[in-house]
Image (cartoon, helix red, strand yellow):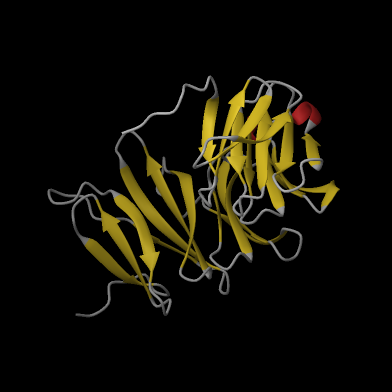
Amino acid sequence: MFFSEVHKQSLGQWSPNGKYLAAAAQNRILIRNAESLKLVQVYVCLDKVERVEWSPDSEFLLTELGRQGIVQVWSLKESEWTCRIDEGLGGVAHARWGLTSKHVLISSDFQLYLSVWALEDQSIAVQIRHPKFANSGLAFSHNGRWLAMLRRCDCQDRLSLYSCEENFARLADVPLAGVLPPGYRAFRVRAVSHARYASSRMGDAPTCCYCYLLTSLQHGSLTSHMPQRGALSPGLCRPGLGSGRRRHHDLGTAWPHIALRLVLSFRRPAG
């Protein structure tokens, strides 16, 4: 076993293609070759780097400067190209890539809004009001056409669906109050079953009991499932998976069992 020399850097991130290693040293970003660890590129940021994230295609690097409320994006192929996103008084609570390298999603402080910036047109940003969480609670569909996000408006949890192809226009907004049992709050969203449905997990920490909601883009209906609580099941519902033909949805529990449900009726199939 061989070890390299010690590099006084932090926030190390491997690129998705495995060819590069990015690390931060104060306000500098150093890109190294994954095999030889030789320097490939050095970027100088405006302030101390607090977080880095590679784009899905490994061609861009996102750097988060929390003190300044600024996000800087760098290109690995074009070293002279740079992008600076300034959220102003809104601040930057969390920045991430979209499903591709074309968009950057930035959550403001106090979850006031989520800004969607297109790198091809840096002067225009789409704002989605009141995301429930800064660094979670959203999911893209498998085909990249829709975005599902949990929002918190007027003391009420909502599940909103947006079209990525239509500049993130809102397609549906489902209030979760009234569907959930008292005391439950949404905490996770996931796109399932060929992107035609969005599922949400709800829970209350004191009892560790979760229910599962399923939303249809076509019908706009919302169905729910709560595992039975008893000696053989504590009521914990794990993430589910959709079948290839979108007719069934399986739900896991804390025990090694799977509950298979029909999507449209959310009932257990016969047999």
Q: Tell me the quarter of the image containing the N terminus.
A: top left
Q: Nearer the viewer, residue 10 or 137?
A: 10
Residue 39 picture quarter:
top right
Q: As drawn, which residue projects farthest toward the right?
A: 123
Q: Residue at x 37, y 39 (%)?
A: 204
Quarter where residue 75 is shown: top right
Q: Is residue 165 visible?
A: yes
Q: Is residue 217 above or below residue 46?
A: below
Residue 201 to residue 198: above or below: above
Q: Quadrant of the C terminus?
A: bottom left
The x, y position of residue 6, in whole percent, is 47, 21
Where residue 31 appears, x then y in whole percent? 62, 36
The answer to which quarter of the image holds residue 87 is top right
Left or right of 122? Residue 234 is left
All told, the count of numbered labels is: 0
- Pick whichever, 143 or 50, lies toward us: 50
Q: Is residue 93 visible?
A: no
Which residue is at 72% across, 34% downward?
Answer: 71
Q: Nearer the viewer, residue 11 or 176?
A: 11
Q: Is residue 7 left or right of residue 183?
A: right
Classify residue 221 as left or right of residue 269.
Answer: right
The location of residue 154, given as percent across then percent down, is 63, 40
Residue positioned most to the left: 231
| Position above or below: 196 against 149 | below
The residue that appears at 53% across and 65% down in the rendered structure is 142
